[in-house]
Amino acid sequence: MYKIETEPDQARALGKNMPISWKDATEIGRFIKGDTVEKAEQKLEKVLEKELHVPYTKFDSDAGHKSGAGDSGGYPVKATEHILELVQEARANAEHQGLNAGALHIDNVITNQGTEYATPGRFRGEKTKAAHVNVIVGEK
C-alpha cells in the first residue's frame, strides 16, 4: 500500500486485510463514490436489505442481470457491511476534525488486494480473500 495524503478539509478511514472480496469492494466503491455520506449510507443499507443491487461494471463476467435494471449486479452483503462501517468511521473522523457533518461527501474509495493466506485445518490449502479499503470523505 502507498501513503495517501489528505487535504485539511478531508478525513479518511482505513481497513486493512478485511475478510472480503477485493472485487466486491471495488464495485461498491464505484457505487458510492461522489455521493453524500448520508446517501451512501442509505444505499448501503438498502443493499443489505436486498432492495437495491450494486451494479457490476468491471468484474461482471459471472454476474446475472437483475430484474428492473438493465445492468448486471449483485448483493455483496458481507463486503457491504464492512464498507458501511468504514463510511461511518470516516464520518466520525471528519466530525472529530471539526468538519461540517451535513456537507460531507465521498471523495474516493481506494481498494487494494490484501494478504492471501491458506486456511489451517480441514480445508488445508484453501485461500482466503482479503482487501485493503480506504474511504476518503470531504466537505463540498
Image: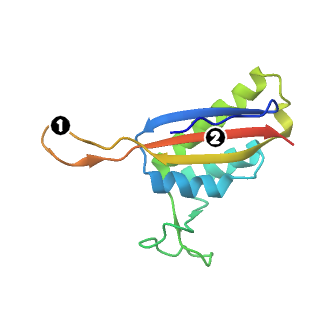
Mark 1, other Cα within 10 Å: few <14 / some 14–19 / many ≥20: few
Mark 2, other Cα within 10 Å: few <14 / some 14–19 / many ≥20: many
Work out whether 106 lies above or below 10: below
On the rendered structure, is 133 left or right of 98? left
Dot 1 corresponds to which residue? 120
Query: Which element type, helix, strand or loop, lies under badge 2?
Result: strand
Dot 2 corresponds to which residue? 135
Residue 116 horizontal/vertical position (percent): 32, 44
Which residue occupies the foreground of this view, 12 or 20?
12
State the quadrant of the C terminus. top right
Colouring scheme applied when the structure was drawn: rainbow
Work out whether 19 lies above or below 97: below
Q: CA distance from mark 2 to mark 1?
A: 31 Å
Q: Is residue 49 visible?
A: no
Work out whether 14 lies above or below 44: above
Residue beneath the point at 17% across and 47% down: 125
Query: Which element type, helix, strand or loop, lies under badge 1?
Result: loop
Residue beneath the point at 47% across and 34% down: 16
Quarter of the image where one finds residue 115: top left
